[in-house]
Amino acid sequence: MKKILITRKLPDEVVNPLKEKFEVNMWHSDEIGMTYEQLKAEAKDAHALWTVLSDKVDRELLESLPNLKVISNLAVGYNNIDVSAAKENGIIVTNTPGVLTETTADLAFSLLLATARRVTESERYLRAGEWKSWSPMQLTGMDVFGATLGIIGMGRIGEAVARRAKGFDMNVLYHNRTRKMESEEKYGFTYAELDTLLKESDFIVLLTPLTPETKGLIGERELEMMKETAAIINVARGGVIDEQALYEALTTNKIWAAGLDVFEVEPVPLDHPLLTLPNVTVLPHIGSASIRTRIAMMQMNADAIKAVLENKEPENRVV
Ligand code: 8YV
């Protein structure tokens, strides 16, 4: 029987059908994930690996797994996997695009609204018993309606965010490697060079994958170009922003606020300087975390693993 290693605890409804045909070894805990060493040891004779973003799948690991045919990652991103090493070793890699687009766009927009209107800060204020009287400028934020939104990385999720922004009467600029002419016409988005977008936007949403080109894309120079009243929202990958530069920009009032669903190191350490700032709204990487979406993502992984182990072509192959 071919062997599948699942590195996180997943619902029975998606895993049980696989058990009819394959030997499934699933991690047991919801509280703690598998370490790299545990992954390496458990994966030794696996034919398939079902991974998540926090699993580092590097060359060393891949080259220690002689049976491995497929890695299916529970995410649209796959920056945790050394895809060149996978390719060289004839290992297929699949991901979960499409099904998470709208859910992740909802979360991006929630974070934008929460950051603009200081939602989590206001809740903390109320719960801490600080709401003693009403004062006119207390907890005032920034208007979202009518503001200019700049989207960096106009893929599927970027477009879904931009469509939502239109419902808020926002003016939408975007920057992307390639122009999206059809969508520009259909939805009225405007292409802008990066620097123009940085200078003109009131809210900037980051939606680029993490690649060597986008690592540290938003650093001191870029933050300096933003409006003092602007907020930056990151739902992409922590590494796209230089966190140290972001901290400096927020503490010296170069920009007004940040909303972060992602961090360079996840889970973010509690003593991270950005967590000390009231004008930073933080979430624990929940972009795609709706029940329906997560199940749909898992179903895609299960289908891809089954296809490869039955010598068929899987869908959503990235390598
Ligand atoms: C992850 C994400 O799926 O898909 C991605 O690339 O960042 C999220 O949707 C989620 O964080 C689980 O790893």
Image (spheres, rainbow, N blue to C red):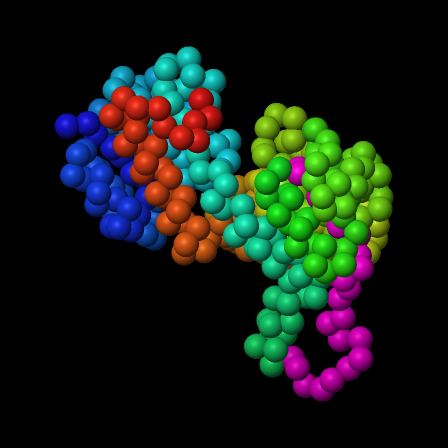
Residue 208 placement (x, y as % from top left): 63, 36
Query: Please, is residue 288 above or below residue 222 in the view?
Result: below
Q: Compared with residue 141, is residue 188 higher up or lower down, i.e. above or below? A: above
| The N terminus: image quadrant | top left
* Residue nearest the observer in this picture, 126 or 285: 285
In front: 269, or 264? 264
Q: Which quadrant would residue 238 be assigned to in this image? A: top right
Q: Residue at x 60, y 72 (%)?
A: 123
Residue located farthest toward the top when viewing the structure as drawn: 88
Is 144 included in the stretch rendered in magenta?
yes
Rendered residue at 57%/77% (across/down): 127
Identify whether 139 is placed above or below 295.
Answer: below
Q: Which residues are magenta?
A: 130-154
- Residue 38 location, x and y as percent? 29, 35
Residue 223 in percent (x, y) is at 78, 43
169 to the left or right of 121: right
